[in-house]
Image: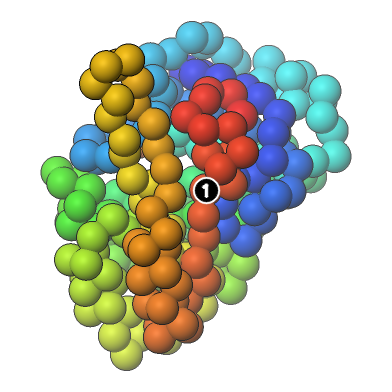
Amino acid sequence: MRINEIFYSLSGEGTSMGVPAIFVRLSGCNLNCSYCDTQYAQEYREDLRVTQIVLRLQLNPIVPLIITGGEPLVQADEVGNLVFATSGRRTEIETNGSIDPPKSWFKDVGCWSVDVKCPSSGPSYGSFKTKWLKRLRKQDQLKFVVGTQEDLDFVKGFLNGMTLKPTVLISPMASILLNKKEGIIEEYWNREWLQEVAEFCKEQNARMSLQLHKIIYGDRKGV
Ligand code: SF4
């Protein structure tokens, strides 16, 4: 499997936010979102067999496993083998919603975290496979990353009248601050936007999800 990084940290988003977990970040992605913050995951640093990954995971034997990317389902066969090999451990898979996994995996995946790409994702907008909507269970989550009013309008239209089993997460995008003098790009939370998204979540009865790892560590890898 093409691996970008394996690390131990706190879950940064969604219903497991703040819970210690071991992450396996796979390399490669089939989409190209305008705001992608894991471009580095296009590269792979290690090519490991499933048995080698399982050995590494044994260093943190009791915490949940979060499989992320890039897009994990680009390596679907291998991910299926990993999920099967770690079936005694709670496993969460973060996916961009554009690829359908086999139905047979669902019993071994404790939580699917599935993105629906909004207009501000640029070329990735429209990539969501609606088949997910029937498949997602109560313990899963459907996530919308929102950066603009157009995104909120899209989410509202998407959710309109729908009864969904998974938790609906609304994740406000951080704003970018470019310091031209020092050549530094900083991310910060725009309170006005956070408040707008908070009001939207109240109206839609959705859960607001901030990216805890960015608040704690900023734009760092392996955290
Ligand atoms: S799906 Fe995720 S990893 Fe792929 S381009 Fe979009 S943000 Fe980046």
Tell me if 186 is positioned left or right of 65 in this view: left
Whether residue 51 is visible to the viewer of this picture, yes or no, is no
Is 218 drawn above or below residue 157 in the view shown? above
Q: Residue at x 41, y 23 (%)?
A: 41
Left/right placement of residue 166 relative to residue 92 reads: left
**93 vs 27: above or below:** below
* Residue density around tag 1, few if under 14, some if 14–19, many if 20 or more, within 10 Å: some
**Could you say which quadrant of the image residue 204 lies in?**
bottom left
Can residue 38 be seen in this snapshot?
yes
Quadrant of res 24: top right
**Residue 196, image x, y percentages:** 36, 71
Residue furthest left as drawn: 123
The residue at 53%/23% (across/down) is 221
Residue 138 point in image, percent of width and height: 58, 73
* Callout count: 1
Q: Is residue 71 above or below residue 155?
A: above
Q: Which residue is drawn at the image coordinates 43% and 13% (left, top)? A: 44
Q: Which residue is mark 1?
A: 211
Q: Nearer the viewer, residue 4 or 11?
A: 11
In the rendered image of this protein, does residue 29 appear above or below residue 49? below
Give percent across and percent down for residue 203. Answer: 40, 86
Which residue appears farthest toward the front when viewing the image? Answer: 181
Instruction: Name the kind of residue labelled 1 in the image.
Output: Gln
Which colouring convention does the figure follow?
rainbow
Whether residue 184 sits left or right of residue 137 in the image: it is left
Q: Which element type, helix, strand or loop, lies under badge 1?
A: loop
Q: Nearer the viewer, residue 84 or 188?
A: 188
Q: Quadrant of the C terminus?
A: top right
Residue 197 location, x and y as percent? Answer: 38, 69
| In the image, the residue with mark 1 has its CB under 8 Å from the nearest atom of ligand 1 | no
- Image point (28%, 78%), residue name: 156
